[in-house]
Amino acid sequence: MSLKVLLVDDHEVVRVGVRALIERHPEMEVVGEAGTVREAVEGAENLRPDVVLLDIRLPGGSGVDACREIKNRWPEIKIIMLTSFAEDETIFDAIACGAEGYVLKQIGSAGLIDALEKVGRGQCLLDPGVTSRVLAKVREARQQEQAAAFRDLNRQELVILARLAEGLTNREIGAQLGLSEKTVRNYVSTILGKLNLTSRVQAAAYAARNRIEDYL
């Protein structure tokens, strides 16, 4: 069965050249071309390629935008980013969105075919340096997300939320903190409102997911 490839680049001359390279291979088929983010997403939806060869810079958005939407909707589709510079910061954003790797536009025909074959077999095109930088960016983003998770809560609210996450009742929390049960109930109501949650169960899950213990 042929490997189905969707080409996405806003320069027609690039698409023509890459198509010619790919179609020399008997087990690969270019099923479509696109030049914008919208066309890339529509092509993925209508053609369901095995691999999308996706330019990282596109009109109407970016290759990262297209990568994110395609991966969110059709995670089985493999994506290789096309870039002119290996140090392009947007590469790391694309990899974090799920792209299997990248190739430079200066790549030779043999290198391009090899990259497509590897990704088609489920391999990734990442060197250790890129992988470590991507993981670092993901960790940093997660830390920033967690830091923002409790930004609107004061110290007392954080403590009460932590006790709630441990499964304590309002009365038990009040006994530990020297507060009345009614006061704790009011605190819990305020916490739910600030976090846009509707139940104690949601609040407990939110606290655990965002590692509330790191903020006490």
Image (spheres, rainbow, N blue to C red):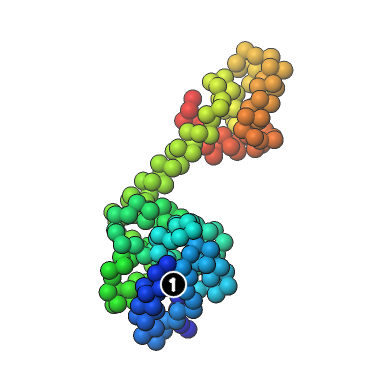
Say whether residue 52 is visible.
no
**Dividing the picture into quarters, in which one does residue 174 lie?**
top right
Within-10-Å neighbours for mark 1: few <14, some 14–19, many 20+:
many
Q: Is residue 157 left or right of residue 199?
A: left
**At x 39% / y 69%, what residue is drawn?**
11
**At x 39% / y 83%, what residue is drawn?**
23
Query: How far from the left and from the top, in percent, is residue 197?
Result: 66, 35
**At x 48% / y 28%, what residue is drawn?**
215
Q: Nearer the viewer, residue 169 or 35?
A: 35
Q: Amino acid at mark 1?
A: Leu
Q: Which residue is mark 1?
A: 7
In the depicted structure, whether residue 178 falls above or below residue 23 = above
**Dividing the picture into quarters, in which one does residue 54 lie?**
bottom left
Label 1 element class: strand
Query: How far from the left and from the top, in percent, is residue 57?
Result: 40, 60
Q: Is residue 187 left or right of residue 54?
A: right
